[in-house]
Amino acid sequence: FQFFQIITGINAVVSFGGTLFAALGIHGLTSALLPSVAFVVGNAIGSFGLVDRVGRRSLLICGMVGMAVTMLVGGSVVLATRERDAEGEERLPEAAGYIVIAMVFGYMFSFGISWGFGAWLYISEIMPLRVRGKAV
């Protein structure tokens, strides 16, 4: 399950989020904190509020759908709205930049509400007690 958690792309989003936000004109502490806040809020809602009501599997699937939709929308907006400025460099219109930022927040929230804690929770619950310490 940890493999599936990694291939969601969270490492790339976390590692290059600052670069993305800087390219969109957001600098400093704001670009570092806001995606983390979205993750923590999603993680708190998922782990404390939804996991026992909705179920582990459903939450993981819904989170994956949320992550896929936000990345598809963000990528589509970039591809559809990019334009060249007077110097020949590619730029995004300001509104498109805000949409991309919102999609990154949505992605972080979707990851936090599902795979951020769900993969660790699920794997610890499906292992038998005799191998749980070694497996987790």
Image (cartoon, helix red, strand yellow):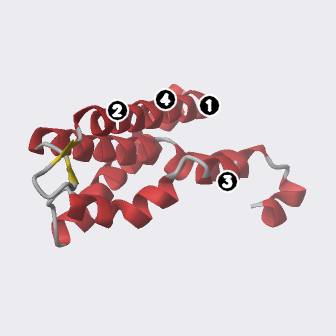
Residue occupying image coordinates x 41% and y 33%? 72
Q: Which residue is labeled 2 in the image?
A: 76
Say the numbered circle drawn on residue 57. Answer: 1
Q: Earlier in the sequence, mark 2 or mark 4?
A: 4
- Of tags 3 and 1, which is closer to the observer? 3
Badge 1 amino acid: Arg
Badge 2 amino acid: Ser
Between the C-alphas of marks 3 and 1, the distance is: 15 Å
Pick the front one: 108 or 51: 108
Which residue lies most toward the bottom here?
28
Say the numbered circle drawn on residue 126. Answer: none
Badge 4 amino acid: Val
Give the structural element (helix, strand or loop) at label 4: helix
Pick the front one: 86 or 101: 86
Mark 2 burial class by Cα count in 10 Å: few <14, some 14-19, many 20+: few
Q: Which residue is labeled 4 in the image?
A: 65
Whether tag 1 and tag 4 are in contact, CB under 8 A, the answer is no
Whether tag 3 and tag 1 are in contact, CB under 8 A, the answer is no
Mark 1 burial class by Cα count in 10 Å: few <14, some 14-19, many 20+: some
Give the structural element (helix, strand or loop) at label 3: helix
Residue occupying image coordinates x 49% and y 54%? 10
